[in-house]
């Protein structure tokens, strides 16, 4: 059965800290891994990763995939209170369904 | 205007009532999904649809049904609501799944409380 596991489930840091969120996956015929940020309601897309070792970067956020060890990390440097959110990762297989398998999410709280 | 809309945004109902949650999209996507989110469990897929003639069960479809009235509309029904269906429900859409098109776009969510 496909599954995606995130760790830690929750994290509290102070502004300026760097955080690393983890996502391990077991997805049949793996095709891509996606990261989403969920603040108040709808998840919003951050990154999609398909190749090992190639970092995706957007401002203070970056992510990388390791297809050999079946995991991905999301790094946030110089955290701000606006980074407080639930971060979701999801795996997609190569079947035609387009289904995403979501992890439990990591709740990040950034204190001033 | 939002690309994916859901109505209602909040609903409180009683056990045994029939409830319909509606989703509309203007993205022109063929694929639509319904998820529920519970604290600590992430998003779990209820049903998904590739077009108006195609409906598929997700991992937690028991107690739910769906209707794809048009390419742009996908409704989720709870025939007889029960308290453990209290959750945040999301509709999402995606493109045909061509290379580089794996992203799903989410609606704002419907918070459902079953008393």
Image: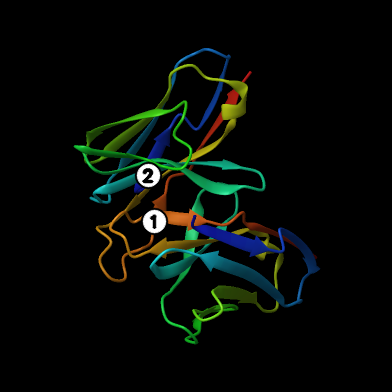
Pinpoint the chain carrying mark 2: B
Residue at numbered disc 1: B104
* Residue A88 visible in the current orientation: no
Position of residue A82 measured from the top left corner of the image (x, y, whole percent): 66, 63
Left of B28 or right of it: where is A9?
Answer: right
Disc 1: which chain?
Answer: B
Q: Is residue A75 above or below residue A87?
A: below
Q: Residue at x 31, y 71 (%)?
A: B100
Residue placed most toward the observer, A79 or A11: A11
| Direction from residue A30 to residue A17 in the image, left or right | right
Q: Is residue A80 left or right of residue A35?
A: right
Residue A103 visible (yes or no):
yes
Few, some or many residues within 10 Å of mark 1 (<14, 14–19, 20+): many
On the picture, is A22 further left or further right than B2? right
Residue at x-position 35% and y-position 63%: B102
Q: Nearer the viewer, residue B59 or A7?
A: B59
Quarter of the image for the C terminus of chain A: give it.
Answer: bottom right
Res B78 label: none
Could you say whether the residue bearing mark 2 is in a helix, strand or loop? Answer: strand
Whether the residues at callouts 1 and 2 have beta carbons within 8 Å, the answer is yes
What residue sits 67% from the left and 48% below the top?
B40
Q: Quadrant of residue A86?
A: bottom right
Categorize mark 2 by other alpha carbons within 10 Å: few (<14), some (14-19), many (20+): many
Residue B63, position as x, y percentages in the image: 47, 25
Structural distance between the alpha carbons of marks 1 and 2: 9 Å
Image location (x, y in percent) of residue B42: 58, 50
Residue that badge 2 annotates: B33
Task: Depth check: give the residue in front, B32 or A6.
Answer: A6
């Amino acid at each position: 059965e496909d599954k995606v596991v995130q760790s830690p489930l929750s994290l509290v840091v102070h502004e300026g800290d760097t955080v690393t969120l983890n996502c391990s996956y077991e997805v049949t015929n793996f095709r891509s891994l996606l990261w989403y940020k969920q603040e108040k309601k709808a998840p919003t897309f951050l990154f999609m990763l398909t190749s090992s070792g190639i970092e995706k970067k957007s401002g203070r956020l970056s992510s990388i995939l390791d297809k050999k060890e079946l995991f991905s990390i999301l790094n946030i440097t110089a955290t701000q209170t606006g980074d407080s959110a639930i971060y979701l990762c999801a795996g997609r297989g190569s079947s035609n369904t387009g289904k995403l398998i979501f992890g439990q999410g990591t709740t990040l709280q950034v204190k001033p | 205007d939002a690309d994916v809309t859901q109505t209602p945004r909040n609903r409180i109902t009683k056990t045994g009532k029939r409830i319909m949650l509606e989703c509309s999209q203007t993205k022109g996507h063929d694929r639509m999904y319904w998820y529920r989110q519970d604290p600590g469990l992430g998003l779990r897929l209820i049903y998904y649809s590739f077009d108006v003639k195609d409906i598929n069960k997700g991992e937690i479809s028991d107690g739910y049904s769906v209707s794809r009235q048009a390419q742009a509309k996908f409704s989720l029904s709870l025939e007889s609501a029960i308290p453990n269906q209290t959750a945040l429900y999301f509709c999402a859409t995606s493109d045909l799944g061509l290379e580089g098109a794996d992203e799903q776009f989410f609606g704002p969510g419907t918070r459902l409380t079953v008393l």
